[in-house]
């Protein structure tokens, strides 16, 4: 019932926006004439938007490609010297601080309004604990999955969240998927499997069964959390995204604090919160925080196709860098699988845009 309520609110907001846009469009056709000054202003605005898109796309690609590498690099003798729960808490705290900093700039330039103030109601904030809890489990699994997969393999398996997102869109938000999208899902499975083929071993796939199970669980958690978060964000379209991010990250900090207490309380009390942290660990935390912010910026200043290109390029960049850092063998199977995955992601995004 909660999902349908969110969906109905989203549809009503979308209809209002469409009506407003149509009204404005009609006015521009009947009451406003274009001149050279307007054309120059439009051209300048297009160049400015293109510049923002380029910067955000490059940032997201670099952050995504280096994320898995930094996690693997932060290991010492095959294990983490630091507490992964404190690392996740630090990520959420940093994202919360960045959201507050962005809000402070908004308040300075626009003042405090009904849409950008931090105070909220119980009916609005009650939705945020669910995705925060899901992201907690997903982020913890993200560290432990590297016991079974390498950085390039992780980037390939990570694309399974596209399947979970598509299926959950159909089930939860009742959005229909096109035949091209379903075909893209099949290609994605084929590409992920091809990339994991290991012809030099008795095992058909490089990733063991435990790694696949963890990847599937992560995909389901990520997909559900993503769909639920999108529904929350679009429930009140006028609400400042930094306010919504702030409350999401606050609950993320709360759940990660509980995880620290349950899993690593003795270690934190005896060795300290930042025990085992190195420069690589700090860079990894910064990367995770900026990646979360970058995704929000991409959705605001760009579109889904930009995320597609970023993800596809990030897979190849991760593989190339891993060749030099971790002696990763770039096999033909991995290369072909990466290409199939890239085509799959591209087809999925194109069909989504054309609907």
Image (cartoon, helix red, strand yellow):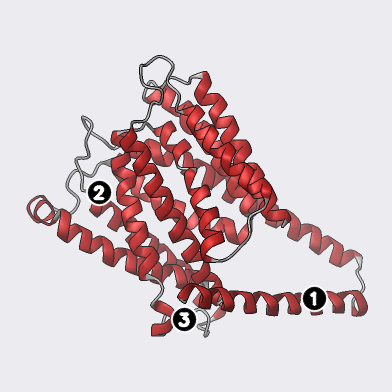
- In this rendering, position of residue 287 left or right of residue 338: left
Q: From this viewpoint, which residue is outermost toward the top?
A: 200
Secondary structure at badge 3 equals loop
The mark nearer the N terminus, 3 or 2, is 2
Q: How many numbered marks are there?
A: 3
Q: Which residue is mark 3?
A: 117
Q: Which mark identifies residue 22?
A: 1
- In this rendering, position of residue 5 left or right of residue 19: left
* Mark 1 or 3: the one toward you: 1
Structural crowding at the residue carrying mark 2, measured as other residues with C-alpha within 10 Å and reported as few (<14), some (14–19) or many (≥20): many
**In the figure, residue 129 lies in which quadrant?**
bottom left
* Mark 3 or 2: the one toward you: 2
Q: Are marks 3 and 2 in contact (CB under 8 Å)?
A: no
Structural crowding at the residue carrying mark 3, measured as other residues with C-alpha within 10 Å and reported as few (<14), some (14–19) or many (≥20): some
Q: Position of residue 317 (x, y in %)?
A: 51, 32
Q: Nearer the viewer, residue 102 or 311?
A: 311
Secondary structure at badge 1 equals helix
């Amino acid at each position: 019932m909660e999902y349908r309520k969110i969906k109905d609110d989203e549809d009503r907001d979308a209809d209002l926006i469409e009506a407003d846009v149509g009204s404005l469009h009609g006015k521009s056709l009947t009451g406003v004439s274009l001149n050279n000054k307007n054309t120059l202003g439009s051209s300048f605005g297009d160049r400015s938007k293109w510049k923002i898109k380029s910067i955000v796309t490059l940032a997201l690609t670099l952050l995504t490609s280096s994320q898995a590498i930094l996690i693997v690099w932060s290991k010492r003798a095959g294990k983490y010297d630091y507490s992964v729960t404190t690392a996740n808490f630090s990520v959420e705290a940093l994202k919360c601080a960045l959201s507050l900093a962005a809000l402070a700039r908004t308040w300075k330039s626009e003042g405090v309004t009904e849409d950008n103030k931090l105070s909220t109601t119980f009916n609005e904030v009650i939705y945020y604990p669910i995705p925060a809890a899901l992201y907690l489990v997903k982020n913890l699994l993200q560290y432990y999955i590297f016991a079974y997969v390498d950085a390039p393999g992780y980037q390939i398996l990570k694309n399974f969240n596209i399947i979970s997102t598509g299926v959950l869109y159909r089930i939860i938000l009742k959005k229909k998927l096109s035949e091209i999208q379903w075909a893209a899902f099949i290609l994605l499975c084929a590409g992920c499997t091809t990339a994991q083929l290991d012809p030099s071993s008795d095992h058909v796939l490089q990733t063991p069964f435990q790694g696949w199970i963890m990847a599937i669980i992560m995909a389901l958690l990520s997909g559900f959390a993503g769909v639920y978060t999108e529904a929350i964000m679009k429930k009140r379209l006028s609400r400042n995204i930094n306010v919504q991010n702030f409350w999401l990250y606050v609950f993320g900090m709360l759940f990660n604090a509980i995880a620290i207490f349950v899993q690593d309380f003795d270690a934190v009390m005896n060795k300290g919160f930042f025990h085992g942290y190195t420069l690589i660990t700090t860079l990894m935390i910064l990367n995770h925080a900026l990646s979360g912010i970058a995704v929000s910026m991409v959705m605001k200043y760009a579109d889904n196709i930009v995320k597609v290109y970023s993800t596809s390029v990030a897979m190849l960049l991760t593989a190339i860098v891993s060749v030099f850092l971790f002696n990763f063998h770039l096999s033909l199977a991995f290369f072909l699988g990466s290409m199939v995955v890239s085509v799959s992601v591209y087809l999925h995004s194109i069909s989504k845009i054309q609907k």
